[in-house]
Image (spheres, grey):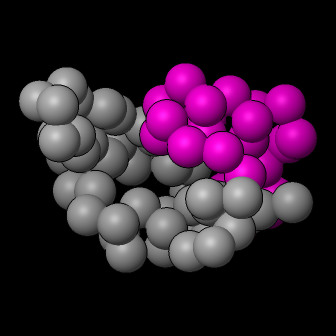
Amino acid sequence: MASWSDLENYLKKHGWNLLRQDGRDKIYEKTMSDGSIRRTAVSKSTGEIGKGLFSRILKQQLGINKEEFSSK
């Protein structure tokens, strides 16, 4: 399973911009090719992301699947 730092590294590599830092979370944003804007939060936690939460982040917030994330 991926860690929060894995997620943040993926976002930085794929053109997501740090929008702001709210307490324990960093909020990233990206304007997609169709003009839509996606946002996601990255926890300061150093641990792994739970399986269900990770799946929701990929699908609902990043719009990718596990294979796309893994091919970083």
Quarter of the rendering containing residue 53: top right
Residue 55 counted in the magenta span: yes
**What residue appears at the point 62 percent right and 60 percent down from the top-left corner?**
69
> Dividing the image into 4 quarters, which one contains the N terminus?
bottom right
* In the image, residue 27 above or below residue 37: below
* In the image, residue 62 above or below residue 59: below
Give how far across and how far down residue 16 sits, in percent. Answer: 28, 56
**Is residue 21 at all visible to an observer of this figure?**
no
Q: Is residue 18 left or right of residue 44?
A: left
Q: Is residue 11 left or right of residue 58?
A: left
Give how far across and how far down residue 64 sits, in percent. Answer: 55, 43
Q: Is residue 50 left or right of residue 20?
A: right
Give how far across and how far down residue 35 sits, in percent. Answer: 11, 30
**Is residue 17 at all visible to an observer of this figure?**
yes
What is the count of numbered marks?
A: 0
* In the image, residue 25 above or below residue 37: below
**What residue appears at the point 32 percent right and 47 percent down from the top-left corner?**
28
**What residue appears at the point 71 percent right and 58 percent down from the top-left corner?**
67
* In the image, residue 47 above or below residue 30: below
> Dividing the image into 4 quarters, which one contains the C terminus?
bottom right
Quarter of the rendering containing residue 29: top left
Which of the two residues, 25 or 61, is positioned nearer the viewer here? Answer: 61
Residue range in magenta is 45-66
**What residue appears at the point 73 percent right and 41 percent down from the top-left corner?**
54
Quarter of the rendering containing residue 60: top right
Give how far across and how far down residue 18 sits, in percent. Answer: 24, 55
Residue 46 counted in the magenta span: yes
